[in-house]
Image (spheres, helix red, strand yellow):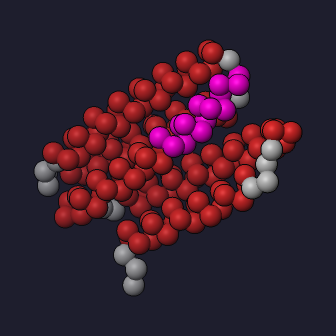
Amino acid sequence: MLNKNMLMIGTVLMSVSVMAPAYAGSDASNTMATDDAVESDVNKLGNEIAAQYEEAKDFTFEQKEDFLAWVDNKSEQLGDQYDDVSAQVENDSEEAVEELAAAWDSASDELSDALEDAKEASADTWEDVKANTVSALEDAQKAISDKQSAE
C-alpha cells in the first residue's frame, strides 16, 4: 500500500501534467485565452491544495520531518504561483501589483513564522502548531487566488 507521501507526490505530479497542456501553443495573440487558462489553473490548483491540506492534518508528531518537507514543497509551489500571478498582474496597474505584493508579503511572513514554530514543536504542541502551519499555507494560497480572481 502506498504511503501518504507517495500519494502527495503523485498528486503534485498529476497537477503539473494537467496544467502543462493549457499553455502549449499559446502566443501573444491569444493572451485572453492564456489568462483564462492561468486563472482556471490557479483555481484548480487551489482546490487540489485545499484537499492536500486536509491530508496534511493527519501527519503525526513522529512524521514531523515529513510534514516540514511537505510544507517546504508547498511553499515553493506557492512562490512559483505568486511569480506567475505577479507577472500577470503587472499588466493591470501599479496598484494591483502593490496590493498583490503586500498580501503575499504578509502571508509569506505568517508562513515563515508558522514553519519556525513547527520546527520547534513538541509532542504536546504538535496539533496546534500543525493546524497553524496549515492555516498559514491556506492563507498564502488565498492571498494569491483572491488577487487573481479580482482581475
**Residue at position x 14%, y 55% in the image:** 123
Q: Position of residue 69 (x, y in %)?
A: 31, 56
> 86 or 139, which is in the foreground?
86
In the shown orientation, is residue 91 left or right of residue 114? right
How many labels sit on residues? Answer: 0
Identify the residue at image location x=55%, y=18%. 98
Q: Is residue 132 above or below residue 127?
A: above
Left or right: where does residue 12 sit relative to residue 39?
left
Secondary structure, magenta segment, majority class: helix
* Apparent side of residue 32 relative to residue 113 in the rendered image (left or right): right
The single residue placed furthest to the right in the displayed view is 29
- 35 versus 74 height, above or below: above
Q: Is residue 16 magenta?
A: no
Q: Nearer the viewer, residue 144 or 122?
A: 144
Residue at figure coordinates x 46%, y 58% from the top left: 52
- Report the span colored magenta: 79-92
107 relative position to 11: left or right:
left
In percent of the image, x 62 and y 32: which residue is there? Answer: 87
Q: Give the image location of residue 107, x and y in percent.
A: 42, 31
Q: Is residue 91 magenta?
A: yes
Residue at the bottom extreme of this rendering: 1
